C-alpha cells in the first residue's frame, strides 16, 4: 500500500519473549508508521541474544527498506543491541563524542558505566533522548534505514516524534485517514461478503471487518495528496453505503 518503503519492527528483550513484560512498542510504532503511509511487513520479537538479533536484522534488511528495533540500549550486561547490530553489519563499534555529550547532558555528574551507550556502529547518528539517558541511533546502511530505539515506551515515543518523524516525512509523501463504520448487520461473514468487491477494486484502502454485534468495519485510506485523500474517502464511503446498512461513521484522528 505504501509503494517503495516497507517496514520491519524488531522487539528485543528476553523479558518480552519469556512473557514477563508485554510488548506495546511494536503496536505503537506500527500504528504510527501506517498512519504515515508506510506498510509494516513484519513484527519480530527476539531475546537479548546476539545470534537471534543478527537473524532478525538480516531478515528485515533483506525484505524491507526501513527497520526499527526497540530495547537493549541500557547499561547492563544484557543490553547488547548496538554491539550485535555492529557485528551483524560488519561495522566497528566506536565511541561517539556526540552521543557522549548527549548522555552528559542528561546526568548531573560525569558518566561512568553509562558511557556504554555512547558506543555506536560506525557511521551511525545518535538521536537525543529528552526523557531518558541512552540516545537512540539512526543508521543508513546500503540505502536501508535503521532506527534503534530504547525499550522504555516513553523514551521510544519521544525519540520517534523528535527524530524519526522528520526523517520519514522526507522519505514518504503520503496522507492517510482511519475510519470506523458501525453497521446494522449482525453477521461479520455477511458484511465481509458485501465489501469483498470494494476491497478488491480499491487497493489503496485497507478494509477490515470486526465480529461485533452489530458488525464494525475499520478502514485505512492512503493517498499522495490531501485532495486525493478527500476524493478517495468520499468515493469509498459512497460505495460502502450502497452495500451496507450504515448506522454511523467515525473519522479517527
Image (tube, helix red, strand yellow):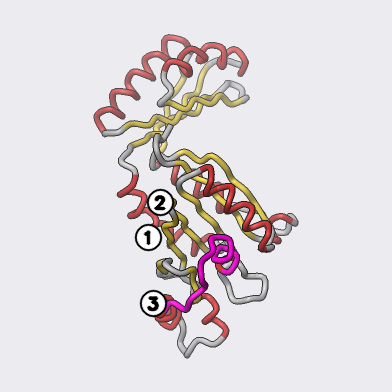
Asked if the residue at tag 1 contacts the one at tag 2, i.e. Cβ–Cβ closer than 8 Å, the answer is no
Residue 131 on the magenta span: no
Residue at the right extreme, as displayed: 18
Q: Earlier in the sequence, mark 2 or mark 1?
A: 2
Q: Which mark is residue 143?
A: 2
Camera-nearest label, 3 or 2: 2
Q: How many residues crowd around disc 1 within 10 Å: few (fewer than 14), some, or many (20 or more)? A: some
In the displayed orientation, state which residue is furthest to the top: 242
> Which residue is the site of mark 1?
163
Q: Is residue 182 above or below residue 193?
A: below
Q: Which type of secondary structure does the marked residue at label 3 adopt?
A: helix
Q: Is 60 displayed left or right of 242 in the figure? A: right
Q: Which of the 4 image quarters holds residue 48?
A: bottom right
The answer to whether marks 1 and 3 mark residues whose Cβ atoms lie closer than 8 Å is no
Q: Residue at x 65, y 52 (%)?
A: 45
Q: Residue 244: give its label.
A: none
Q: Residue at x 37, y 31 (%)?
A: 222
- Name the residue at the front extreme: 90
Name the residue that disc number 3 marks. 98
Q: Position of residue 116 (x, y in %)?
A: 55, 78
Span highlighted in magenta in the image: 83-96
Q: CA distance from mark 1 to mark 3?
A: 15 Å
Count of numbered circles in the view: 3
Closer to us: 227 or 127? 127
Task: Classify 236 as above or below 178.
Answer: above
- Is residue 58 toward the left or the right of residue 66 in the image? right
- Please state the horizontal and vertical placement of residue 24, each as a whole percent of the image: 58, 52
Helix, strand or loop status at disc 2 = loop
* Mark 2 vs mark 1, CA separation in Å: 18 Å
Residue 13 sits in quarter = bottom right
* Position above or below: 134 against 200: below
Amino acid at each position: 500500500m505504501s509503494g517503495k518503503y516497507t517496514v520491519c519492527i524488531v522487539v528485543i528483550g528476553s523479558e518480552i519473549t519469556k512473557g514477563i513484560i508485554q510488548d506495546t512498542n511494536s503496536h505503537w510504532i506500527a500504528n504510527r508508521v501506517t498512519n504515515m503511509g508506510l506498510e509494516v511487513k513484519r513484527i519480530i520479537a527476539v531475546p537479548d541474544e546476539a545470534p537471534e538479533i543478527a537473524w532478525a536484522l538480516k531478515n528485515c534488511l533483506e525484505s524491507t527498506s526501513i527497520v526499527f528495533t526497540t530495547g537493549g540500549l541500557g547499561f547492563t550486561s544484557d543490553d547488547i543491541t548496538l554491539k550485535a547490530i555492529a557485528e551483524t553489519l560488519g561495522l566497528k563499534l566506536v565511541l561517539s563524542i556526540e552521543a557522549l555529550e548527549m548522555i552528559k547532558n542528561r546526568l548531573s555528574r560525569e558518566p561512568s558505566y553509562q558511557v556504554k551507550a555512547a558506543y555506536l556502529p560506525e557511521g551511525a547518528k545518535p538521536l537525543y533522548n529528552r526523557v531518558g539517558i541512552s540516545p537512540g541511533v539512526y543508521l543508513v546502511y546500503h540505502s536501508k534505514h535503521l532506527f534503534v530505539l530504547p525499550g522504555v515506551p516513553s523514551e521510544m515515543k519521544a525519540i520517534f516524534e523528535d527524530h524519526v518523524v522528520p526523517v520519514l516525512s522526507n522519505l514518504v509523501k503520503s496522507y492517510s485517514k482511519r475510519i470506523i463504520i458501525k453497521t446494522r448487520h449482525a453477521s461479520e461473514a455477511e458484511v465481509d461478503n458485501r465489501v469483498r468487491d470494494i476491497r478488491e477494486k480499491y487497493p489503496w484502502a485497507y478494509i477490515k471487518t470486526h465480529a461485533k454485534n452489530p458488525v464494525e468495519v475499520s478502514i485505512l485510506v492512503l493517498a499522495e495528496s490531501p485532495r486525493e485523500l478527500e476524493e478517495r474517502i468520499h468515493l469509498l464511503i459512497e460505495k460502502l453505503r450502497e452495500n451496507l446498512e450504515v448506522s454511523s461513521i467515525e473519522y479517527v484522528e
